[in-house]
Image (cartoon, rainbow, N blue to C red):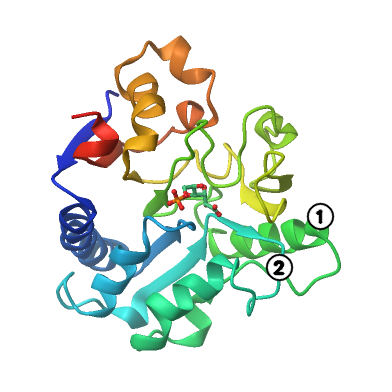
Amino acid sequence: MKPEVLVFDDLEALSLSAAERLGVVAREAVRGRGRFSLALSGGHTPRRLYALLAEGRAGDLPWDRIHLFWGDERFVPQSDPASNFRMVREALLERIPVPPGNLHPVPVCLGSPVEAAAAYERELRAFFASEGEPAFDLALLGLGDEGHTASLFPGSPALAERHAWVAAAEAAPGIIPRSRITLTLRGLSAARAIWFLVAGAEKAPVVRILVDGSEAEAARLPAGRIGGAGPVTWFLDRAARGY
Ligand code: 6PG
């Protein structure tokens, strides 16, 4: 299935469109299945989208039916400035009436990334017990300029994981915090929809490979190996598209 590529003037327009579309997807999921399961991306790019969700730009969202997960997390306390949970808490959670039981952060309080990954996998498998698959209604992903997504970095052993939905991983040297927990390719393979949100000229070369390159060229990059059940959509600003 060929990915859909959407190009916006800037990050603000990208984020606004993603918010409006996310509202439609969320309401459809709740109507159809009684709940909406959303895997959130970390990093900087999605922060504006999360703020727009908090501001109601997605329309009315049935937060009591929405379950929030993290596609990856840094193995740091939730109070740490590098925590993806903290970023989402500040941009979104503090401003919406989502029931605490609907929040599914990675348990970084546990003793090690391996323990945290195993515990998170148990939580996901319990949540998706009836589907038997990590069938997120929507997974949001970012993109590193060397092709990583979530915390699946080029050459990472986590990329070879075929069975586990969640794995401990390490960021590339020089990228801190290095210790991570991430959904694996398997953990992202059953999402009903996958959206990459990418902005900035520094991402244009890797976007060109992933969007315009051959399947073989794309598959050399972690982000190029994402996919499975549902459609993949690229939300790009003009700079990331190389315009
Ligand atoms: C993380 C993210 C990571 C991020 C990319 C892009 O925990 O760092 O999950 O995959 O999406 O590195 O990050 P920016 O949006 O900050 O460019």
| Residue at horizontal 80 percent and vertical 71 percent from the top | 110
Q: Is residue 30 left or right of residue 194?
A: left
Q: Is residue 204 left or right of residue 116?
A: left
Q: In the rendered image, is residue 18 in sight?
A: yes
Q: Is residue 162 above or below residue 29?
A: above
Q: Is residue 73 left or right of residue 141?
A: right
**Callout in the foreground (1, 2):** 2
Spatial separation of the CA atoms under disc 1 and disc 2: 13 Å
**Cβ atoms under marks 1 and 2 closer than 8 Å:** no
Q: Dot 2: few (<14), some (14–19), or many (≥20) neighbours within 10 Å?
A: many
Which mark is on residue 114?
Answer: 1
Q: Position of residue 238 (x, y in %)?
A: 19, 38
Q: Nearer the viewer, residue 75 or 26?
A: 75
The part of the image, by quadrant, that contains residue 63 is bottom left
User: Which quadrant does the C terminus fall into?
Assistant: top left
User: Which quadrant does the N terminus fall into?
Assistant: top left
Q: Is residue 6 left or right of residue 62?
A: left
The residue type indicated by label 1 comes to: Val
Which label's residue is closer to the chain start, 1 or 2?
2
Secondary structure under tag 1 reads: helix
| Residue at horizontal 57 percent and vertical 59 percent from the top | 129
